[in-house]
């Protein structure tokens, strides 16, 4: 299936799900273990699925491992959702991954904001230009630090190929200013998942990222649909039901963010393995008990989950 920029834009206006990276006991990626997760997401109607995002432990993967995930996962998605490939780290690594993305079956790329401590706003602009040129696909910017300033954010959005911004800072009023400044044509997405989707939607963002889709895509879809019809009460009610899950993910300076998702999947019988350092693994005993109780409340607990 050939994916048009309009289909990518429509997907960004919905759910940008971030897939975990399954690891086996030998600490090797096992992309094929994503099949049941992807099947459930596709069945629920998740709009887009991202490989090599933060929930995918992108910065814990080697370049070769990121290449493998990008090469193999699009075939599992098989066009049922828009496939977005995360790229980043050094500009050479990002350009390398971006240059392969289209041939690997990705529909768009997501450019991780460089974490370099000496990052300059104009340096980030040059970084994204090089990556966008190499990709030849719609580009989504992943903005985790808005300190680069509104002029730089506007310049990033003017780079040919840029179609969306995943806004992953809690500065909602700055987001509103960015949306107003950039104007139509760029889709700003809530990049802080379901809990932040209502306030960001209220100031003009469309769609949200989600790690919950690995476990309960139906709930993410219900939140998406409620927000699309302006039903904030229903959306907030569903979000309240995942409050414990999100609180567990925020423990240890957010170091359990991926760990909780992976541990929950294991409890459901879906073996995606461990989370790599510097993530927290295993979960602290009290957190593990709370998570098991929650998965049980959701009716997803399987006695044979742990092997």
Image (spheres, grey):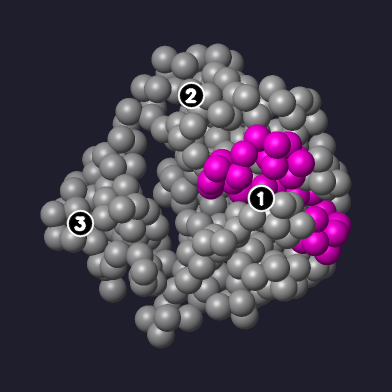
User: Does any portion of residue 129 appear in the rendered image?
Assistant: yes
Q: Closer to the observer: label 3 or label 1?
A: 1
Disc 2 is placed on an element classified as helix
| Residue drawn at x 67%, y 27% as measured from the top left | 179
User: In this orientation, which residue lies closer to the viewer: 191 or 172?
Assistant: 172
Q: Counting other residues with Cα less than 10 Å from the Cα at mark 1, is it few (<14), some (14-19), or many (20 or more)?
A: some
Q: Label 2 to label 1, Cα distance in Å?
A: 29 Å
Residue receiving disc 2: 198
Q: Label 3 to label 1, Cα distance in Å?
A: 41 Å
| Residue drawn at x 74%, y 29% as measured from the top left | 182
Q: Position of residue 100 (x, y in %)?
A: 78, 69
Residue closest to the far bottom: 26
Q: Earlier in the sequence, mark 2 or mark 3?
A: 2
Disc 1 is placed on an element classified as helix
Q: Main secondary structure of the magenta part?
A: helix
Residue receiving disc 1: 121
Residue closest to the far left: 286
Q: Position of residue 242 (x, y in %)?
A: 34, 36
| Residue drawn at x 77%, y 61% as measured from the top left | 131
Q: Label 2 to label 3, Cα distance in Å?
A: 29 Å
Residue receiving disc 3: 288
User: In this orientation, which residue lies closer to the viewer: 251 or 211?
Assistant: 251
Q: Earlier in the sequence, mark 2 or mark 1?
A: 1
User: In this orientation, which residue lies closer to the viewer: 145 or 220?
Assistant: 145
User: Does any portion of residue 79 appear in the rendered image?
Assistant: no
Q: Which residues are magenta?
A: 128-157
Q: Is residue 214 above or below residue 305?
A: above
Q: Position of residue 209 (x, y in %)?
A: 54, 42
Asked if residue 141 is among those painted magenta in the image, a careful observer would answer: yes
Q: Closer to the observer: label 2 or label 3?
A: 2
């Amino acid at each position: 299936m050939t994916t048009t920029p309009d289909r990518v834009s429509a997907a960004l206006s919905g759910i940008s799900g971030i897939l975990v990276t399954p690891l086996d006991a030998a600490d090797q990626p096992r992309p094929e273990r994503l099949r049941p997760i992807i099947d459930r997401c596709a069945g629920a109607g998740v709009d887009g699925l991202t490989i090599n995002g933060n929930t995918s432990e992108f910065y814990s993967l080697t370049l070769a491992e990121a290449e493998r995930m990008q090469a193999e996962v699009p075939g599992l998605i098989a066009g049922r959702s828009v496939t977005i490939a995360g790229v980043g780290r050094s500009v050479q690594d990002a350009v390398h991954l971006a240059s392969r993305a289209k041939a690997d079956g990705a529909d768009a790329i997501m450019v991780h904001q460089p974490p370099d401590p000496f990052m300059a706003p104009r340096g980030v602009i040059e970084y994204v230009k090089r990556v966008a040129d190499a990709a030849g696909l719609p580009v989504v910017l992943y903005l985790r630090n808005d300190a680069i300033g509104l002029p730089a954010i506007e310049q990033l959005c003017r780079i040919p190929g840029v179609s969306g911004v995943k806004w992953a800072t809690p500065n909602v009023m700055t987001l509103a200013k960015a949306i107003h400044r950039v104007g139509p044509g760029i889709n700003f997405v809530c990049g802080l998942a379901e809990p932040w989707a209502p306030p960001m939607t209220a100031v003009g963002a469309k769609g949200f990222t989600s790690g919950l889709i690995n476990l309960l895509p139906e709930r993410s879809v219900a939140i998406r649909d409620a927000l699309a019809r302006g039903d904030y009460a229903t959306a907030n009610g569903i979000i309240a039901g995942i409050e414990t899950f999100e609180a567990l993910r925020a423990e240890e300076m957010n170091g359990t963010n991926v760990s909780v998702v992976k541990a929950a999947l294991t409890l459901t019988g879906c073996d995606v393995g461990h989370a790599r350092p510097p993530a927290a693994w295993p979960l602290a005993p009290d957190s593990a008990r709370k998570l098991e109780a929650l998965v049980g409340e959701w009716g997803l607990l399987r006695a044979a989950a742990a092997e």
